[in-house]
Amino acid sequence: MLLDGAKQALAQGGATCDVLTVPGVLEIPACLEMAVAAQGRDPSARRYDGYVVLGTAIRGESDHYDHVCTESMRGCCDLSLRYHLALGNGILTVHNEAQALKRADPTRKNIGGMAARACLRMLDIKRQLKLDQ
């Protein structure tokens, strides 16, 4: 549902997307950095203008959840700042499946759509500030 909401928002914004499925929430920052590195530093050669990260971490019985959430969010934020990424963050950190479904559903909270719209807005800001041109 997160992906559906993101795709709808991107299409409404006139953007296209590719999807890369990763093993889990904790691996999102590493895969994001790999995607950035694969593009190189030349803005004219870049394939992607922005990124939308989506995933769900549901609290369990151990403190593993806390580490996964903290490190995933920190990693994405660090990369966004380091590389001036237009990034929409749709990683859900919830206590149970019902919360996840409510937030992911495009007809309810639509966090995937919100993340995609955030990415598009960040692209607008980059253009306004003339970054990477």
Image: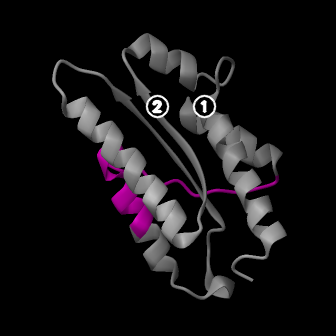
53 vs 61: above or below? below
For the magenta stretch, what is the residue range? 14-33
Label 2, label 1: how far apart the Cα atoms are:
8 Å
Q: Residues within 10 Å of mark 2 (few under 14, many from 20)?
A: many
35 vs 78: above or below? below
Q: Position of residue 48 (x, y in %)?
A: 62, 69
Q: Are marks 2 and 1 in contact (CB under 8 Å)?
A: yes
The residue lying toward the viewer, choosing from 81 and 44, is: 81
N-term-proximal mark, 2 vs 1 = 2
| Residue at left offset 46%, top offset 68% | 35
Q: Position of residue 118 (x, y in %)?
A: 69, 46
Q: Position of residue 76 (x, y in %)?
A: 45, 54
Q: Which mark is residue 77?
A: none
* Quarter-of-image position of residue 104: top right
| Residue at left offset 59%, top offset 64% | 85
97 vs 60, left or right, is right
Give amino acid for label 2: Leu
Question: On the image, numbered disc 1 is attached to which residue?
Answer: 111
| Residue at left offset 81%, top offset 49% | 13
Q: Is residue 24 visible from the viewing direction of this image?
A: no
Question: On the image, numbered disc 2 is attached to which residue?
Answer: 92
